[in-house]
Amino acid sequence: MQNNVLILDFGSQYTQLIARRVRELNIYSEIKPYNNPPKDLSSYKAVILSGSPHSVRGDNPPHPDLSEIKGKKPLLGVCYGAQYLAHFHGGEVGQSNTREYGRANLSMVKEGEPFLEGVSSNSQVWMSHSDTIKQLPEGAVRIASTHDVENAGYRIEGEDTYAIQFHPEVYHSTDGKKILENFLVKIAGVAQTWTPDAFVETTVADLKSKIGDDRVILGLSGGVDSTVAATLLHKAIGENLHCIFVNNGLLRKNEYTDVLKQYEGLGLNVKGVDASARFLDALEGESDPEAKRKAIGRVFVEVFDDESKLVENATWLAQGTIYPDVIESVSATGGPSATIKSHHNVGGLPDYMKLKVVEPLRMIFKDEVRRVGASMGLSAELLGRHPFPGPGLAIRILGDITPEKVRILQEVDHIFINGLREWGLYDKVWQAGAMLLPVNSVGVMGDERTYEKCVALRAVESTDGMTADWVHLPYEFMQKVSNDIINKVKGVNRVVYDISSKPPATIEWE
Ligand code: XMP
């Protein structure tokens, strides 16, 4: 791939943000761990060094060999990257007198620097460091300062090497994207050709030549990733793509038929398999959360295996794996061991299936998946769907699962989600759902005493599900939804709202 940018990761919490910001400029970028950089650098037109939880003054700080990069390719050091370029090249890094976290404003921006063109002189920047650059390295020219950080930005004379103490990738750095654009486009001359349309075109061509006339099976979940992956494959190989959509009996109300209808509308070759009874049988009497998940995973593999055997000569398995699932992450301790997160949308298939794996989305982020989907004409409604866990309502029914409990929760969830849509709140929430608690409580309806189930509603905002906070839904909305649920769903007499953040709670209750 031409016009590629390499981001060397030193373990910062913001590294993925750098890649996303670069890609928002329509420039392709890849993250690689500092301790396992690519051997062949020829396709990279510029390199960015990320921040890090480490100090260059600590024991064994990240210290990769940059001899093939520094002075030879355009190079930008961010935070730790800037300190690294100073410390190992004749400068001095020490502890700052005050720990600097959060907003700051530039107080000096050197005139005439293409790197800082269009950056206002008091531009807000985001700081997150406890070390500071006390003395610049050899050949450096200071180009920016803040009130507390004299050496907030510098460049090296005679090289395309730049360094900034603040984080341009964080939204709070108001001119951050401009700075990245100046560096990549003006200084490094990278072309802005990475667009969703271009991605679709090259991916479809790659899939065609990789798969040829072979047959591919893909497990659709109704979610954004598997749907976009299927649409790309369908463009490439048409009817040779065989999609399987399994009803595990734990989907939302009407979801099985609605989603199948939606797929028909997209022209995909989809087979719906209603295996509800198989899943519910396997779950009978089981109340341990992990055992429930394992049972669902096992039955899914069995069902999927049975179904794929019906597709003659299938040689490939397609998955909707996305980039955050495959980035080699630098361990939190910064040790040399890099771990690779593995991800199996279909719950890990047995080896005997011997299928080759194709993952058309493995190099793109979730927001890019949506943009790619939009460029292929998928509806905003489909692309904006909330995430829904593979084990479905099973992990929202606390304790054992019965068909009656599934029915109750489907009704409650339906009222809640429809309510969010009707009140224009659905798109403001990252994920929402209801939990059926293993608790009965006393209530009164008419003149009758009731002793019925309690449900908890949960709505969170998040960017990736790793952290989340509860959403401040309007009281009037909660009042209406609570009334509707208690009046319409037989078996429920109490509704509560979950106001826990993640961490320490999780989004799902099991
Ligand atoms: P937690 O509960 O860990 O959930 O805060 C984070 C996000 O992951 C989803 N989730 C799952 N998705 N299979 C999935 O496909 C699972 O087993 C699973 N468990 C949790 C959850 O809905 C939330 O979006």
Image (spheres, rainbow, N blue to C red):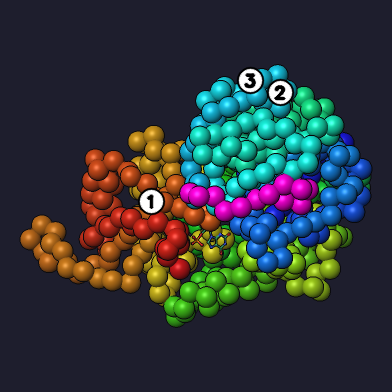
Work out whether residue 489 or residue 495 is closer to the camera in this orientation and state it: 495
Cβ–Cβ below 8 Å for labels 1 and 3?
A: no
Circle on res. 9: none
How dense is the environment of label 2, judged by Cα within 10 Å: few (below 14), some, or many (20 and up)?
A: few
Front-most of 401 and 421? 421
Q: Name which of mark 1 and mark 3 comes first in the sequence.
A: 3
What residue is at 54 percent from the left and 34 percent from the top? 146
Q: Which residue is mark 3?
A: 118
**Region of the chain picked out in magenta, as a range:** 87-98
Are circles 2 and 1 on residues that touch, CB within 8 Å? Answer: no
Does residue 16 appear in the picture of this structure? no
Q: Is residue 292 above or below residue 496?
A: below
Q: From where the camera sits, is residue 40 visible?
A: yes
**Residue 489: in magenta span:** no
Q: Are marks 2 and 3 in contact (CB under 8 Å)?
A: no
Residue drawn at x 51%, y 71% is: 280
Q: Secondary structure at mark 2?
A: loop
User: Measured along the vertical axis of the image, is residue 282 above or below residue 63?
Assistant: below
Q: Residue at x 63, y 45 (%)?
A: 134
Mark 2 or 1 closer to N-term?
A: 2
Q: Is residue 258 left or right of residue 163?
A: left
